[in-house]
Amino acid sequence: MGVACRGYMLSAMKSFEELRVGDVMTTGVISCSPETPLREVAELMASRRVHAVFVFADGDQYTTRLWGLVSDLDLVAGAWAGAAARTAGELAVAPLVSIYADEPLARAAMLMAEYGVGHLAVVDPDDGRPAGVVSTLDLARAVAGEPATAHVSV
């Protein structure tokens, strides 16, 4: 499983219309493989205090391709259906909905509504690797005009 730094970069000086995805996204990558049991995914989310984990085809964000994303809501959906016997690959949203950091935050909101997802992978435009994630909570903070929380290591 991969782990990187998590932080928010919300600028309180900008209106929602002026904000870009990169202004509010959570940076870093926490990942697992499709074969990872959901119990381990849940433990990873709880210990790292995140709501989503990237799923890579071979579990390594540096050498393999991004495959999907498991959110806290995916875990809830799987819990009643025997989560102990299920894997990240069974419940991951795939193919993943992604966006670039320099795109308008309004586009992120539109994509979330269009695809019915609460998280978007923020990917590097040059190599397609994930740089972080933007969630509905990040958008809610932006709408509320709240300043970002401090950078948190995970």
Image: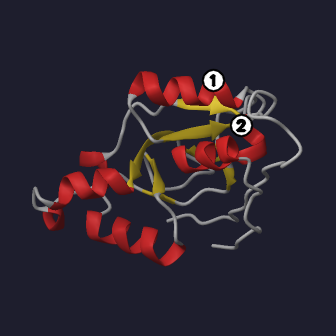
In the picture of the structure, the residue carrying the numbered disc 1 is 107
Q: Which x, y percent locates residue 130?
A: 63, 43
Above or below, 130 against 86 in this view is above
Judging depth in this view, the residue of 38 and 77 nearest the camera is 77
In the picture of the structure, the residue carrying the numbered disc 2 is 21
Q: How many marks?
A: 2
The residue depicted at 42 percent of the width and 36 percent of the height is 117
Which is nearer the N-term, disc 1 or disc 2?
Answer: 2
Above or below, 108 against 33 in this view is above
The residue depicted at 45 percent of the width and 34 percent of the height is 96
Q: Which x, y percent locates residue 84?
A: 16, 68
Cα distance between the residues tagged 1 and 2: 9 Å
Q: Amino acid at mark 1?
A: Arg
Q: Which x, y percent locates residue 114?
A: 44, 21
Rendered-image quadrant of the C terminus: bottom right
Judging depth in this view, the residue of 136 and 90 nearest the camera is 136
Above or below, 32 against 55 in this view is below
Q: Please give left or right for residue 44 compared with residue 88 in the image.
A: right
Q: Residue furthest bottom?
A: 47
